[in-house]
Amino acid sequence: MNTAQTIAAIAGVELLRLIRSPTSFTLLLVVPALQLLLFGHAVRPTADQVKLAVAGPAASQDRILRLTGAAGLKVVAHHLPPGSAEAMVRSGRASVAVELPTGPFAPVRTVIDASEPGLTAKAESQIQAIYWQALAERNDVADYGPRLHIERLFNPGERSDWAFLPALTGTIMMISMLMLGTLSMARERELGTWEALIAMPVNRGELLAGKIAPLVVIGSAQGVIVLALSAGIFQLPLRGSIFALVALMPIFAAAHLVLGYALASRARTQLAALQGAVAFYLPAMLLSGFLYPFETLPPWAQALGRIFPLTHFVRASRDATLRGADAGTVLLHGSPIALFLGAALMLAFAQHRARLD
């Protein structure tokens, strides 16, 4: 039996095992569906979720209310007596309060609940713009001079779900493949079937290739499905070379599968293997640009973040969807992912040799 036939035989056995395991389908289908709905639909920190209260003279409030309505802020109370808007923020009934001045030289006070800056930061900048616009209109200088024209590239509507969804494709694949690789190896070792596979007349490369081949196909299909659902449900634009992004998915899936096998080879139990997987993917999510903009990280965190394949897949997916990049630009992000796959293979083979010794 040649190498290709050996790998195909091992892959067939692994595929049958996956089909008979309901846990695998839960991890591959149910969990990604929940993540897609949560990040794509539920998690939207936009300005229209910020509760605004306005207090002060009624004449000034009318202009403020008109401008805040145009900015999309959610006004929950207005025409309040002085001090009442601030009281609503302190009691938790509003996130932002605008206290208009009662005297000619008193400042306009804006009180913000800063316990959730991710929610109120955009609203704060909009309120500052509203103040200057109202001041210009009051002094009759709004129509003088050149106007400010802002053009937003790639995401003109500033949709927060479009920022999450390209990166979410890679995040779902990373977690699924890492968990499947870890649990598959750990479970076989605990059941004793891994020793039987090692006793077969196959080398380490054939055994590993046969084990991960069906999972790579499934993981790549999972990435394509998430990307298609993002485009169909949330209108995520597919402006660039999607085929190049799909070509990166098997390499990205294999990198995390092999790492999962290496972690499980090192661990003695499934619980220990899972702890190793979590210890890897949590920093990857935090330092890859998925949850926080990569450019805002300190230099040491950026250097560490470049180690994770997710960092480069996030860039590739955003280039292929929002930015409209060509195939060469998208595929260029695959080089660090391939290097990581090579390092993971060496680690897996080293752990395999250590277990045999």
Image (tube, rainbow, N blue to C red):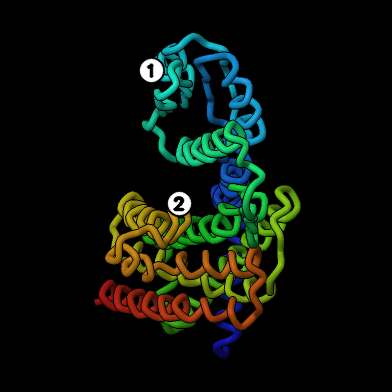
**Front-most of residues 136 and 284:** 136
Q: Amino acid at mark 1?
A: Arg
Q: Quadrant of the C terminus?
A: bottom left
In this image, 117 relative to 150: left or right? left
Where is mark 2, residue-wise?
A: 291
**Front-most of residues 282 and 200:** 282
Counting from the top left corner in percent of width and height, residue 136 is at: 57, 38
Counting from the top left corner in percent of width and height, residue 23 is at: 54, 48
User: Callout 2: helix, strand or loop?
Assistant: loop
Q: Amino acid at mark 2?
A: Leu
* Residue drawn at x 60%, y 84% as measured from the top left: 5
Visible residue check, residue 319: yes
Q: Residue furthest right?
A: 232
Where is mark 1, residue-wise?
A: 90
Counting from the top left corner in percent of width and height, residue 113 is at: 40, 28
Do the numbered discs 1 and 2 sit on residues whose CB atoms are within 8 Å? no
Q: How many C-alpha atoms fall within 10 Å of the one at disc 2: few (<14), some, or many (≥20)?
A: some
User: Callout 1: helix, strand or loop?
Assistant: helix
